[in-house]
Amino acid sequence: MEVTKEESRQAIEPQFLSQAQANGIKLHIGQMNKTEHEGIIRDIGRYEINLEENGRTVTILKQEMSFLTAPHPVIIVPEPQQTSGPADQALVEPSPGKPNIQQEFLDKAIKENQLLTLYLINGQCIRAHIEAYDSFTILLKEDGKQHLYYKHSITTINR
Amino acid sequence: METNLLDRMLDTYLTGRTSVTVTLRNKIRVSGRIKAFDSYVIIMDGHKQEILYRHAVTCVSPLPQEEHKRQPASSRPAPPAKTAPPRPEKSASHQPRQTQPQPQALSPSATENLNNSMKDGLLKWMQEQKAEK
């Protein structure tokens, strides 16, 4: 099976969810309509997750999730400079005719450890450092907490 | 990774006749039992029948008191008959619903209204019968 460039990028979201489930980490989940949930992941589906909240199993759809917050880092992202530096170059370079603007922007932000400001669809605003990203999500760190933001809930990112 | 967890959960709630709360995008909560569902809609069987589009659903959860009766995930396929509350089909509206004391959806006033309307209907019918005699 041939793997495209986009897919070969490390998938953050499934890793984050399965790690949180395996370690029984209590996650704080924010939804697009500003309702919030807190609990432990029980099942992970492709489009939804089961969360155990106050003894009940709540099914939450990923399409309506805005962010997941863990009280401490769930996945450890390797430092970009030493390990994935050359690999990143190789990833970006082969398409000189059609630059991937988003990828360049986010890679630069990771490398230079920039403080980003994210504006969400529901008007919320977050300032945090970006750790990693994949096709659908962005992993942020902010005073010891780790946040996973879905791109579908983000309107703009400012440097 | 499961492909359609929501379908499985809805099926569990449907077969277990569990009262659920479905939260929609606009934060409206709809409570009741699931009557049927397919890949696009869910038909709810609350105090009035409703059809929900699944694209508007953000979250599905059982009502608090129902969850305690549910067994852990391993023994889910066989809902215990003992713990399930007796469900008198016809007399359900005469007695206060123990199965759903959820304040937001089926408040006592709603059942009272139902009772009153039934009483009114019965009275009217009795009067009609008398008049005929």
Image (cartoon, grey):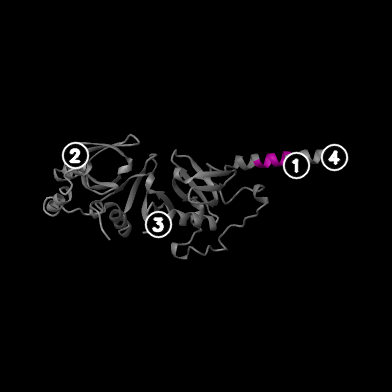
Q: Which residue is mark 4?
A: B130
B6 lies left or right of B107: left
| Residue A125: percent from left, percent from top | 28, 36
The lab-note entry on whether marks 4 and 1 share a chain reads yes
Extreme residue in the top direction: A123
Q: Which residue is mark 1?
A: B122
> Mark 3: which amino acid?
Thr
| Residue A1: percent from left, percent from top | 28, 61
The label nearer to you, 1 versus 3, is 3
Q: Which residue is mark 3?
A: B3
The lab-note entry on whether marks 1 and 2 share a chain reads no
| Residue B82: percent from left, percent from top | 57, 63
B6 lies left or right of A12: right
Query: Spatial distance from mark 1 to mark 3, Cα to Cα?
Result: 51 Å
Q: Which residue is mark 2?
A: A115
Q: Secondary structure at mark 2?
A: strand
Q: Within the image, what quadrant is residue A2 found in?
A: bottom left
The quarter of the rendered structure image containing the C terminus of chain B is top right
The tag earlier along the polypeptide, 1 or 3, is 3
Q: Is residue B80 above or below residue A157?
A: below
Q: Secondary structure at mark 3?
A: loop
Residue situated in front as seen by the camera: B83 or A12: A12
> Mark 2: which amino acid?
Leu
Query: Spatial distance from mark 1 to mark 2, Cα to Cα?
Result: 71 Å
The label nearer to you, 3 versus 4, is 3
Proximity of marks 3 and 2: CB atoms separated by less than 8 Å:
no
